[in-house]
Every structure is written in structure tokens, then in C-alpha cells.
Image (cartoon, coloured by chain):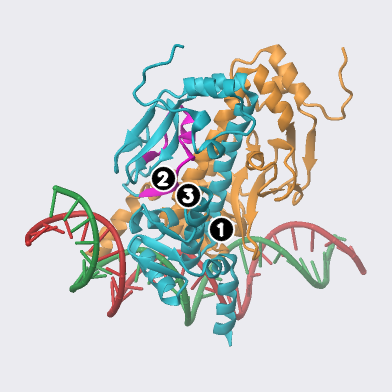
Chain colours: A orange, B cyan, C red, D green
Amino acid sequence: MPKSPCHHKTECAHCSLRELCLPVGFRADDFRQLDDLIRQSRRLKKGEHLFHAGENFVSLYAVRTGFFKTAVGTQDGRDQVTGFFMSGELMGMDGIYANRHTCDAVALEDGEVCELPFDCLEELGRRLPLLHTHFMRLMSREIVRDQSVMLLLGNMRAEERLAAFLLNLSQRLHARGFAANDFILRMSREEIGSFLGLKLETVSRTLSRFNQEGWIAVEHKHIRLLRPHALQDLVSGYESRSRNSITRI
Amino acid sequence: MPKSPCHHKTECAHCSLRELCLPVGFRADDFRQLDDLIRQSRRLKKGEHLFHAGENFVSLYAVRTGFFKTAVGTQDGRDQVTGFFMSGELMGMDGIYANRHTCDAVALEDGEVCELPFDCLEELGRRLPLLHTHFMRLMSREIVRDQSVMLLLGNMRAEERLAAFLLNLSQRLHARGFAANDFILRMSREEIGSFLGLKLETVSRTLSRFNQEGWIAVEHKHIRLLRPHALQDLVSGYESRSRNSITRI
DNA sequence: CGGGAGATTGATTGTGATCAATCTTCGTGG
DNA sequence: CCACGAAGATTGATCACAATCAATCTCCCG
């Protein structure tokens, strides 16, 4: 069996992220072809860049372990965090358009990614319709996610943004088998702020307010959601309505 | 020749939007297959919905003529315009993920779209790699566009947002052979505001300010860009810097 | 011509930004 | 291992920008 002696070869068929990453209905032979595609997995240390804006686009990257952010920058130095990525999520789809990355991807803790050379992926997609369809759906999911971020940035108040953010993290961690209501933030207050269109002081203040209200318990980066449905009500607009009605009396 | 007697059959090969819509390198036979795919073009009157959030996803829609918006809504009635679409641009890619549309698409003036049934498109993409690649790039372009909207909503001040918005419209109209510096806004102040995360009064005031400064000439929905590079400087942050330095003296 | 939606402009308020001063934590090197 | 310094986080005081409330005004469209 001509197996490459690659120092760190992954196997999709046995990957615990299979059901997050891959379509259902894949057969053994499909997995074999996919494994051939994955050049190798790449390890990154905290702070390392997976790719930079402006770099040639070659591969997509699926997170195996660790936590990443993507960010776009302006001429005048400002930058906007456009997303946080955890295991099973795909980065780099922005690069397909112009064969050039439009954002930076940075590891927020030590981690590991599967590198998927795009031309191989495309070629394989032609032979495996299931993979092709699945990949379309991943891109579409990114578009849907972006829509909800726009809604957040365009319509929500600071408290609502932060509540939505915490609930989103909670839900994604839960989907990966972690506790939904007890987790460590891998990003700084400033990075949260950049993502949510707020300043770091506002993030800090708002977390403190949630803490005082008893919705959550904050110990630095360790967050516990004590009353997640209170956060949910905030996002759904109940709280702001009742607050207004109180104010108006 | 078995030509369908469809009342309003389009022909991609002779469409003036060909170079906006389709990949280069298509041959006569490719066009024929694509024309078979397009079920028909659909006419919409101002205010009509192309699709609603929650509806089953069947087709993508390419704008032939007219002007459209997409918008996502919340439980509590707020809504966020997520994009404006003009000729050659594609709507509905959000629906691929869950086979369900996540936003509304509405005509802002009478117009016409090509309906592209998605399963046909996928099937055809398998036979025409060029089409398949092109479609990936369109989805990626949407992701890139969304990133820049996030940057706008997360980092920019009202003046910067509006300047970026006007320049973006200008550039897209110019790419379609229209005047870059003299155009009609097809959307209301409220819709601009929803897209930019501002209230309609702020949009109106900011346009008035640009008008007074002599950057633009506003006559209701008729806009002329008199000093587009002044708007560009604003977006690039020069203006805000100099303003700060003045304020600090 | 009249009515209603959309737009402009003004006055005031409120939310989050900014400026600033501590405090904490963590990484580094002595 | 501890001391130190730097980066990150919290909290407070004040300010500025855009939201809100409100009063016309304009222009379509019927």
C-alpha cells in the first residue's frame, strides 16, 4: 500500500469532527480520496498567522483544534474582526473570488488546521457530487452568518450584541460536546469589541453589568451563563421593550 | 429545431450582461445549455417580493434590469437591509445552506430577473467546470462584500459610511456603463439608513452636509458627485485625522 | 387637486466613545 | 523562584455623535 510517510497525516474517516466538517453519506473510498487531498495538517502557535490579507490564495483551512479569528483592515490602520472560528469550521473562502486573501487569519491559541488545496478540492468535487454540494452549503452558511452579523452591527444595542455573542459561542461550544454554560473566552476584550463594533471598555462594562444582574458570572476569561434565557430575552428585544415602558411611565 | 415557445426566453450569448454574469471562455454550446437551464425571466413591479425569508429555496436570481434589496428581519419587527442589487448581480445564495431563504428580496423599481433553478445549475456545473468555478467565485465575492459591510458597520462614522456607500454605488453604476457621478437613488433614505446602520434623519442630515460642503449635489433622489475624491479621503480616514488634529489644538 | 408618504430641519436626549487612573495577570529574564 | 515590566481589564468622569421627538415641507401618485 503506497502510504505517504507524512509526519502528521490526518484521516477524515476517523476524525471526531467528521459530522461537523463533512457531508453524510460518504463511503470508505470517498474518505480515501479526501485524505489524499489534505496535504497535511498544520500546527500554529498562539498569535501565528495562518494567512495574511493580500497573500495568494491556495488553500482553505479547516480548524481541527484551537481557536482562530479573521480580520480585515483599512488603509488607516483600523481593523475589524470578521469572525471567530472553532473546530470543524472553515476559513479562507474569501480568497476564492480574486485568488487572493482579503483578510488575516490568526490563531488565538495553539492549534491545528487541515490544509485543503483549493484546486484539488474543486477537482475532487467534480467526482464526488456530495462533496461539491456540501461545499456550496458551507459557503452559503458563511453568507447566512455574515447576514446575522450585519443585523447585529446595524440594529442592536451594546447589551444585545454582547448577549447574542455569548449565546452564539455557547451554542457552538455545546454542538462540539463542551459545556454550554461554562467556558473560557479565547479572545481579548478588544477583539470581542472589534467583532461587535464596540470599544473594549464598553465590552468590559457590559460584562460587569450582566454579572451584577446575575445573568452571568465573569472571572476574567472564564464565563458562566447563569440565566441564558435572560440573555435570550435581551436579544429578542423583550428587555428593551419593557425597559422603555418603564422609562415612559 | 425544438425551441420552446416560452413567452419571454432569454439568450445568455447575446445578453449585454454577459461579461458581468458569466465566465470568460464560454463557447456556443455552453451558452445553449445554460439557456436551457434558465426557466424563464420573471418581471416584477416596484415593491413586489422575489422571495420571502422562510420560503423554500428553489432558484437563484440574476438581475437583468431594475434594482433590488435584500433584508433580514428579527422576531421583534426590526429589519436590516443586507444589500442592494443591480443588473448582473446574483440574489438568493443564502438559501443554499438550509434549502430555505433567510432574507426577503424586494424590487425597488420595476425590473426583471433570470431565474436559475439551483439543482439544474449544480448539474450543469458538473459538466461545465468553468461555470462551476465561476459560481464559486460569485459566492466568494458575496462573502468579501459582506466583510466590507461589516467593516463599515463596525468601524465607520456616519459620514464615512455614507461616503463609502455613494462611492460604491458610483463604481458599480460606472461598471455598467452609466455615469459614475450622476445618478438616481432607487431606495428611500430609510432603506439607506437600514443598510448603513443609521436612522433616516441621520442619512438626510449627512447628505445635506455633503451638499453644503460642495462634495455632492443633492436634489431629492438625484445625486451628483462633485468631488468624489473628497468622499474617498473621508472613507480613507484623512478627513477624520485632520479634524482630530484641529480639535486637539 | 388633494392626500399621504417621504424628506428636511431643529431641539433635546441618551448611548457608547474617549480620556484617564488603577488593578490584575502573565510572560520574561535575572 | 521571584521581581519586573508590559499587556490586558476594570472602573470612573466627561464628551460627542447619532437617536429620538417633533414640526414643517415637498413631491408624487391617485
Q: Earlier in the sequence, mark 1 or mark 2?
A: 1
Residue ID for mark 2? A232
Tag 3 near tag 1, CB within 8 Å: no
| Amino acid at dot 2 | Gln
- The image quadrant of residue B45 is top left
Residue C17 place in picture, x, y as percent: 52, 69
Q: Nearer the viewer, residue B142 or A39?
A: B142
Q: Nearer the viewer, residue B61 or A214?
A: B61
- The image quadrant of residue B106 is top left
Q: What's drawn in magenta, residue-wise?
A: B79-105
Q: Specify whether residue A31 is painted magenta.
A: no
Q: On the picture, is A190 further left or further right than A197?
A: right
What secondary structure is marked by label 3? Answer: helix
Q: Residue at x 51, y 65 (%)?
A: B160
Instruction: Measure how far apart labels 2 and 3 are at the Cα level.
Output: 18 Å
| Amino acid at dot 1 | Gly
Q: On the picture, is B1 further left or further right than A86?
A: left
Residue A106 place in picture, x, y as percent: 71, 49
Per the rendering, the mark at residue A193 is 1
Per the rendering, the mark at residue A150 is 3
Q: Nearer the viewer, residue A41 or A248?
A: A41
Q: Label 2 marks which chain's residue? A: A
| Amino acid at dot 3 | Met
What secondary structure is marked by label 2? Answer: helix
Q: Specify whether residue B86 is painted magenta.
A: yes
What secondary structure is marked by label 1? Answer: helix
